[in-house]
Image (tube, grey):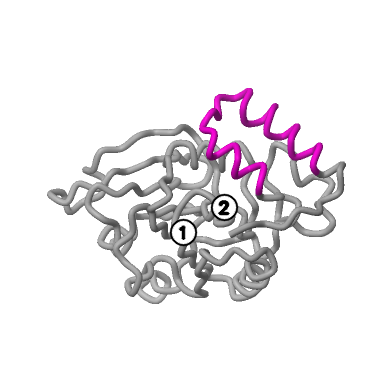
Amino acid sequence: MEISKGAPELLDQMRNHMIETQLKDRGIINPRVLAAFRQVPRDRFVRHEDIGRAFDDRPLPIGFGQTISQPYVVALMLQALDLQPTDRVLEIGTGSLYNAALMAQLAHEVYTIEIVPELAKRALLLAEELNLTNIHLQQGDGYLGWQEQAPFDVIVLTAAPKEFPPALAEQLKNGGRLLAPIGDGQDQKLLIFTKDGRQVDPMKWAVRDLGAVQFVPMVSAYKSNLN
């Protein structure tokens, strides 16, 4: 679970400045979340040509039409989820692995699914390199979830679905939390749902609105085959 030290002093300074100005000054106060951001070097999760911009207050491209999210948005998600050391988390959309690496500092186990084979391979190699032993990665269609490892305490979507994936609702524990950007294009809201087992429709669960966001669309080979 530990990420080895050794980043150049300048990158350490940039990371600390990011934490102070982009996170703490904007209301991120959870000490465990802030500690995770100190532990996980964001510069390791961006393209080589973007290392100098790794701590900027914006998303960055990682290839294949995907991005690594803005640091503040990631911190907002993690603070709202309030992950516990006993939580088992399912992440849909591994991407750069950055969000999974942060959650690995906060939760017991992180299961993450990436649909793009090249990104999945890159993330797997990086997880091994950084000794993130409580991250379990699968290349596949996140719309279907990870039935073999269900149920989960928390499910996190890092891309915006056009409609709520039913398999994910089923694989969440009763009382568990599901975080997802919901909506199309620029009209998205970041929502946290708390599962109510009496309600089949997740849109009838208790929900908390974290505000407007803009995530890449969720891609599903399964849904494409149905249409």
**Image disc number at residue 99:** 2
In the displayed orientation, state which residue is furthest to the left.
Answer: 198
Residue 15 in the image, given as x and y percentages of width and height: 74, 40
Residue for point 49% across, 67% down: 113
Q: Is residue 151 above or below residue 70?
A: below
Q: Is residue 43 above or below residue 208?
A: below
> Is 162 one of the magenta-colored residues?
no
Q: What element carries label 2?
A: helix
Residue 153 in the image, given as x and y percentages of width and height: 33, 54
Magenta part of the protein: which range?
Answer: 12-39
Q: In this view, does 66 lie to the left or right of 14?
A: left
Number of other residues with Cα within 10 Å of mark 1, as a class: few under 14, some 14 to 19, many 20 or more: many
Amino acid type at circle 2 is Asn
Q: Is mark 1 on a helix, strand or loop?
A: strand
Residue 150 in the image, given as x and y percentages of width and height: 31, 66
Residue position marked by numbered label 1 in the rendering: 91
Please report contact status of discs 1 and 2: CB closer than 8 Å, yes or no. yes
Q: Is residue 44 left or right of residue 65?
A: right
Q: In this view, does 72 lie to the left or right of 143?
A: right
Number of other residues with Cα within 10 Å of mark 2, as a class: few under 14, some 14 to 19, many 20 or more: many
Residue 62 in the image, given as x and y percentages of width and height: 70, 59
Q: How far apart are marks 1 and 2 (CA)?
A: 9 Å
